[in-house]
Amino acid sequence: MPERGQPLAGKTLIMSGGSRGIGLEIAKRVAADGANITLIAKTDRPHPKLPGTIHTAAAEIERAGGTVLKVVGDIRNDDVVAGAVEETVRRFGGIDLVLNNASAIDLSPTDSLPMKTYDLMQDINCRGSFALSKFSIPALRKSAAAGRDPHVLTMSPPLNLDPRWAGYALGYTIAKYGMSLITLGLAAELRADGIAVDSLWPRTIIATAAIRNRPGGAERAATARTPGICADAAYLVFTTPSQEATGNFYLDDEVLAAHGITELDRYRAIPGDGPLTPDLFL
């Protein structure tokens, strides 16, 4: 049984991505309870511009208190995803939590977006989330039957049909809204099974390495929050009874406010009181 104050102790999370950024922070927050974490990630060797590999991430997660299964592979490969699910069940006895975190981004307008990049975003963002969720369903059903409050959480925005977003970056919008449609559909499909399916999105831009490395990254970081706000929000979703939290498109600060956390200055990437930059799709 989980220790008091550690509701995720002994539970198992399988996630896509997680070598760095928001995914890694969520994994560490879950690991602090003593959870098991399966990481599916491609970054086996250091990236020339981005810090972190699956190996450094696993070490951080273990230091936070978790037990890690590393799966070096591509979320676009069905055999990799199905194999990761099977190995997770063998190693840890089941799956209670799924985090669809891996995502590719290119904000180019339609006429300049290479079709190869369009396909990459569709395959990682939408298809990858569909595949990991799909292959995990049998284990999640067993988790529900055992009363372990299973959750699928996808890092994707609320569905917003304001044409502003599709008109701004159509390829990326299609890929991210595809992830959100998975939440909408699976929540309805799996409700009777007692499996919660939700999405989570940050209210503001998040100061990840990808943001900092872009031109003007230092200035953008001054109007951003840290990945910790998403990690704390995800943890609160994961620790909510599955019958009480499904079919939602959560914003990180709304989740915190619902739990009485309204002082958010600690999440600012750079201390100050200036305006924060809203994230896309809001």
Image (cartoon, grey):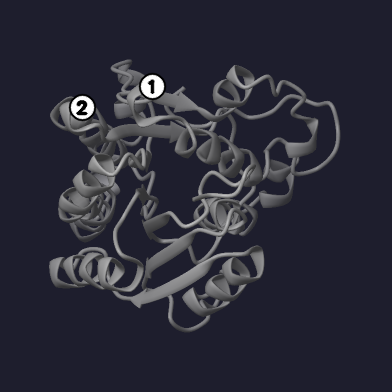
The residue positioned 74% from the left and 24% from the top of the image is 275
In the current view of this chain or complex, which residue is farthest to the bottom? 45
Residue 148 coordinates in the image, percent (x, y): 36, 42
Dot 1 amino acid type: Glu
Which residue corresponds to mark 2?
Answer: 191
**In terms of depth relative to the viewer, which is nearer, 59 or 177?**
59
- The secondary element bearing badge 2 is classed as helix
* Placement of 239 over or under 213, stated as above or below: above
Which residue corresponds to mark 1?
Answer: 244
* Placement of 36 over or under 137, stated as above or below: below
Q: Residues within 10 Å of mark 2 (few under 14, many from 20)?
A: some
**In terms of depth relative to the viewer, which is nearer, 71 or 112?**
71
Counting residues from the start of the chain, the first of labels 1 and 2 encountered is: 2
* Placement of 24 over or under 129, stated as above or below: below
- The secondary element bearing badge 1 is classed as helix
The residue positioned 62% from the left and 43% from the top of the image is 4
Q: Quadrant of residue 243?
A: top left
Q: Quadrant of residue 198?
A: top left
Dot 2 amino acid type: Arg
**In terms of depth relative to the viewer, which is nearer, 107 or 45?**
45
* Placement of 29 over or under 172, stated as above or below: below
Locate residue 73 relative to residue 220 in the image: left or right: left
The residue positioned 23% from the left and 29% from the top of the image is 187
Labelled disc at residue 233: none
The answer to whether one can see residue 13 in this image is yes
